[in-house]
Image (tube, rainbow, N blue to C red):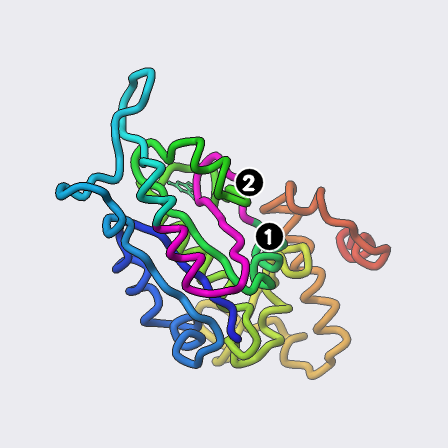
Amino acid sequence: AAPRIDVITLFPEFIESSLEVGVVGRAVKRGLLSVQSWQLRDFAHDNYKTIDHRPYGGGPGMVMLIDPLRECLQMVRQADPRPAHVVYLSPQGQPLTQAKVRELAHRPRLVLLCGRYEGIDERLLQAEVDEEVSIGDYVLSGGELAAAVLVDAVGRLQDGALNDPQSAVQDSFENGVLDCPHYTRPERHELGDVPALLASGDHRKIARWRRQQSLGRTWLRRPDVLARCDLSADDRQLLAE
Ligand code: 6GU
């Protein structure tokens, strides 16, 4: 069966609308990936559909209640017999990287918990969440955008999602460094010419040039990424040129 992602959220339309378009929308339509969203409010216990309350200890904002989330998760788990890997999207999580995306893309079942307000009662997180993930060092008003990011990054890696599977291998970060520059027609333009080497047909030289460009712009733009990369002797030579 295709991998399945369940998203627990107060804004299911948000997740659903992002699946109507693009590479991942097509992957879902082709049945390569199944994505289901769940309205947390449906699991509230009162007529007001309460899913949050004021924090113990005082302070601003609201905290999401344990029980609606727990009952929702129970239904989500029951909807498919495969064991679920539960991810909570929050700025306190581990940073999402392409390596993490690849790892999550191999899981048959993901459940994404989207928080709003100040967060979720810590006891629910301790009991039910396998890992906490952040999409970067800035604050969003809720986890939905982060969940959509994760669904997209994981979805495009599913077998058959990309028209050319080679394109996933070429991406920035897939080989540890940033992607090289790209050019298309026309070869000569008011804004500049395409580097002659790319039109030469010399595939060895082209591959070398691209690798050099990748390394060079990683050095300039993301020295942090380059520092964590183990470069070959050839790579070091290319960087030095
Ligand atoms: Cl996963 N959630 C929220 N609310 N803000 C974020 C985030 C997640 N990742 C970065 N900022």
Count residues near mark 1 (Cα–Cα under 10 Å), then give few for <14, some for 14-19, many for 20+: few
- Of 167 and 219, nearer the camera is 167
Residue shown at the point (52%, 56%) measured from the top left = 84
Disc 2, ligand 1: is the CB inside 8 Å? Answer: no
- Of 234 and 125, nearer the camera is 125
The answer to whether mark 1 and mark 2 are in CB contact below 8 A is: yes
Specify the segment rendered in magenta: 72-96
Where on the image, by quarter, is ligand 1?
A: top left
Q: What amino acid does circle 2 point to?
A: Gln
Q: What amino acid does circle 1 point to?
A: Lys
Residue shown at the point (67%, 75%) measured from the top left = 197
Q: In the rendered image of this protein, does residue 202 appear above or below residue 95?
A: below
Residue corresponding to mark 2: 94
The residue sitting at the bottom extreme is 201
**Residue 209 belongs to the span the image colors magenta:** no
Q: Position of residue 88 (x, y in %)?
A: 45, 44
The label shown at residue 100 is 1
**Residue 75 belongs to the span the image colors magenta:** yes
The residue sitting at the top extreme is 57
- Residue 49 is left or right of residue 179, and the answer is left
Q: Position of residue 28 (x, y in %)?
A: 41, 74
- State which tag comes first along the sequence, 1 or 2: 2
Residue shown at the point (51%, 61%) measured from the top left = 109
**Which quadrant would residue 190 be assigned to in this image?**
bottom left
The residue sitting at the left extreme is 47
Count residues near mark 2 (Cα–Cα under 10 Å), then give few for <14, some for 14-19, many for 20+: some
The label shown at residue 199 is none
Q: Position of residue 31 (x, y in %)?
A: 44, 78
